Amino acid sequence: MQLEATTTLAGEAIDLGLAHATIAAYALEAAGTIRDLDPELEAATVQHLLAMDERKIG
């Protein structure tokens, strides 16, 4: 039973590592191209983060 749980956990960790590596590779490849982050989404994210900072300070 313990071995199955450990094997499952190891498999999930490998899957997450591969997913992270795939996303990171795509991000490096897409950076500065038309496939890069949507400018409107990026602006909304910045506004959201600034609002969060203001709430922490104020």
Image (cartoon, grey):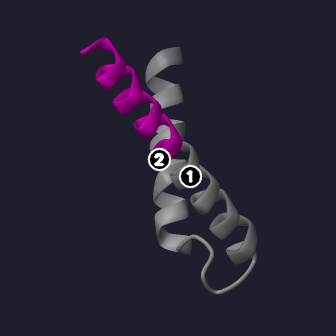
Any magenta on residue 7? yes
Q: Give the quarter of the figure containing the N terminus.
A: top left
- Residue 2 is situated, as x and y percent measured from the top left of the image, at 31, 12
- Residue 54 is situated, as x and y percent measured from the top left of the image, at 50, 27
In the image, what residue occupies the spot 73% across and 74% down?
29
> 41 and 50: which one is in front?
41
- Residue 44 is situated, as x and y percent measured from the top left of the image, at 46, 58
Q: In the rendered image of this protein, does residue 35 appear above or below residue 4?
A: below
Q: Are marks 2 and 1 in contact (CB under 8 Å)?
A: yes
> 40 and 1: which one is in front?
1
Left or right: where 47 falls relative to 29 = left
- Residue 6 is situated, as x and y percent measured from the top left of the image, at 39, 21
Residue type marked 2: Asp
**How dense is the environment of label 2, judged by Cα within 10 Å: few (below 14), some, or many (20 and up)?**
few
Q: Secondary structure at mark 2?
A: helix
- Which residue occupies the extreme left position in the image? 1
> 50 and 26: which one is in front?
26
Q: Which residue is mark 2?
A: 15
Q: Which mark is residue 18?
A: 1
Query: Which secondary structure dominates the residues rendered in magenta?
Result: helix
Left or right: where 23 falls relative to 15 = right
Residue type marked 1: Leu
In the image, what residue occupies the spot 52% across and 74% down?
38
- Which residue occupies the extreme top position in the image? 2
Left or right: where 50 falls relative to 27 = left
Q: Which residues are magenta?
A: 1-16
In the image, what residue occupies the spot 43% across and 38% down?
11
Rendering quarter of residue 50: top right
